[in-house]
Image (tube, rainbow, N blue to C red):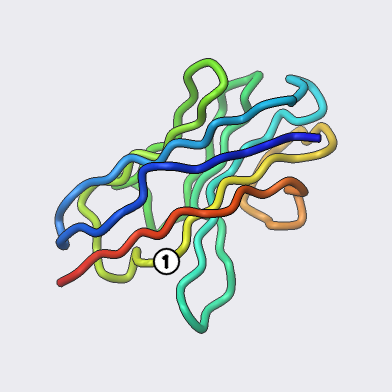
Amino acid sequence: QVHLVESGGGSVQAGGSLRLSCAVSSYGYYSNNCVGWFRQAPGKEREGVASIDISALSTNHADSVKGRFTISKDKNTVFLQMNSLKPEDTGMYSCAASSQHQYFCGLERTNFDYWGQGAQVTVSS
């Protein structure tokens, strides 16, 4: 059973930066190779923000965050560096891991089966 714990959320003004961390434990490099960040704003569906293949280190970013957000990994922690934040980036951010090996991690929720509790990010204008 993969266990994920997020940290680093908070409140920031537009244009500011935050870094989210996702501590991943009890995972396998092959079967749980995809780790992703998702967000959900009030009244909206959960959407994929970025994902990383922790064995190949390939990454994917949603068009809405390209050039502003960067996903990375260091040992057992996956980070989401968020720069130039906008009010529309507000939401609950969750990290997730796959339960089966994926050849392309992507940003589809259905590719991810283990989820953390989430960290709130609030961006004020």
Say if 74 sits above or below 71 in the image: above
Q: Along the horizontal axis of the image, is 115 left or right of 89?
A: right
Q: Who's the residue at 56% across and 63% down the image?
A: 47
View extreme (top): residue:
75
Number of numbered discs: 1
Rendered location of residue 3, percent (x, y): 69, 36
Residue 17: x %, y % from top left = 22, 46
Q: Nearer the viewer, residue 22 or 50?
A: 22
Q: Which residue is mark 1?
A: 91
Give the residue at x 77% y 22%: 28
Q: Tell me which residue sits at (73%, 48%) in the image.
A: 112
Asked if residue 44 is positioned above or below residue 124 in the image, the reply reads: below
**Residue visible at 46% across and 73% down?**
41
Which quarter of the figure is the N terminus placed in?
top right
Residue 19 placed where, x, y %? 33, 40
**How many other residues sit within 10 Å of disc 1, few (<14), some (14-19) or many (≥20)?**
many
Answer with the quarter of the image where residue 100 lies: top right
Q: What amino acid is at disc 1?
A: Gly
The answer to whether residue 108 is above or below residue 2 is below
Instruction: Locate the C terminus by quadrant.
Output: bottom left
Quarter residue 21 falls in: top left
- In the image: residue 95, left or right of residue 87: right
Left or right: residue 101 versus residue 89 is right
Percent position of residue 109, x then y: 69, 57
Disc 1 is placed on an element classified as strand
Q: Which residue is at the far bottom?
A: 43
In the rendered view, tell whether residue 38 sits above or below residue 22.
below
